[in-house]
Image: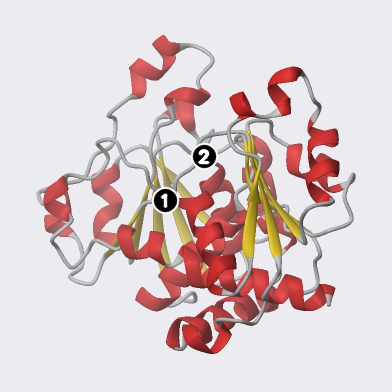
Amino acid sequence: MRHEDIISAKQLSRADIEGVLDRAAEIAADPAAVADRHANALLGLCFFEPSTRTKMSFAAAIKRLGGDVVDMGTVESSSVKKGESLADTVRVVEGYADALVLRHPMEGSAQMASEFVDVPLINAGDGAGQHPTQTLLDLYTIREAAGLDDVSIGIVGDLKYGRTVHSLAHALTNFDATQHFVSPESLQLPRKVRYDLHEAGATIREHTDLDAIVPEVDVLYMTRIQEERFPDESEYREVAGEYRIDTTTLAAAADDLTVMHPLPRVDEIAPEIDDTDHAAYFEQAHNGVPVRMALLDLLLEAQS
């Protein structure tokens, strides 16, 4: 791994990605072999937004490597409530930990915070910006299900505010993948993301009709339309519930179609899909532990 900080999927080369995914596969096959690999290592968790999967899987990952966490807790119970700046918070936590994980509602916050600390800082989501470790576990899941080359992926829902979408789209430019983006016109990919994809030579298609692309894709990546990102609630109400899949939607899908979702879902995927062979979203969430174990192992090893 060449990078001390993991800020954006754009910084990851194909070799970087494959290195993490290969290490994750090794760990998943024999987790006991790394049980004490980073004994006494401490991971600082600085979450300024709610999180279930990302926060818990990072905690599980470092503990399964023999280490532990120091957690700043909620914003309401921390010195942030007293007016402490982000720069001061990460500089303080840096003194307690060997690496930091940061989630923050402001796009660009991870890059800014990384300039104030000397330990590795991992971006766990910065507003509508990037979420690179979610992308690594997404790629791990896609590789297990369909491979990462000669693959067609439908990415559906909130493409404007969806940081998981932005990170995944950038990372897929390292592979021979066709990306079909499906959204309401008001939630299309941001211009800067579309520009980056074109510059990287990505093959992309944009749609508003979900049914039209279901028969064409190997992977269907559903996302939640994020009410909390909309400046105007009425704008959210206009598009809420726009895309939902059920067994009728998937009647035209290939038998081996893989359905993914970064979770939490609201009503994008009907519960009846859970019991089909298409559903991979809970496995996708579980893959967060070996993938984040692999990433932490590589980063901490580079520090030693």
Residue ID for mark 1: 262
Q: Is residue 4 above or below residue 105?
A: below
Q: Along the line of sight, which residue is nearer the eye, 101 or 274?
A: 101
Q: Is residue 82 visible?
A: yes
Query: Which quarter of the rendered picture does the C terminus lie within?
Result: bottom right
Q: Under tag 2, what secondary structure?
A: loop
Q: Position of residue 17 (x, y in %)?
A: 63, 73
Q: Count the marks: how many?
A: 2
Which disc is residue 164 wearing?
Answer: none
Residue ID for mark 2: 162
Q: Is residue 68 above or below residue 125?
A: below
Q: Along the line of sight, which residue is nearer the eye, 109 or 297?
A: 297
Q: Position of residue 186 (x, y in %)?
A: 47, 25
What's the image's color scheme? Answer: secondary structure
Badge 2 crowding class, 10 Å Cα cut-off, few under 14, some 14 to 19, many 20 or more, is: many
Q: Is residue 217 visible?
A: no
Ranked by sequence position, the earlier of labels 2 and 1 is 2
Quarter of the view holding residue 110: top right
Q: Is residue 285 left or right of residue 39?
A: left
User: Residue drawn 89% across and 44% down?
Assistant: 116
Q: Under tag 1, what secondary structure?
A: loop
Q: Position of residue 122 (x, y in %)?
A: 70, 55
User: Residue drawn 64% across and 80% down?
Assistant: 19
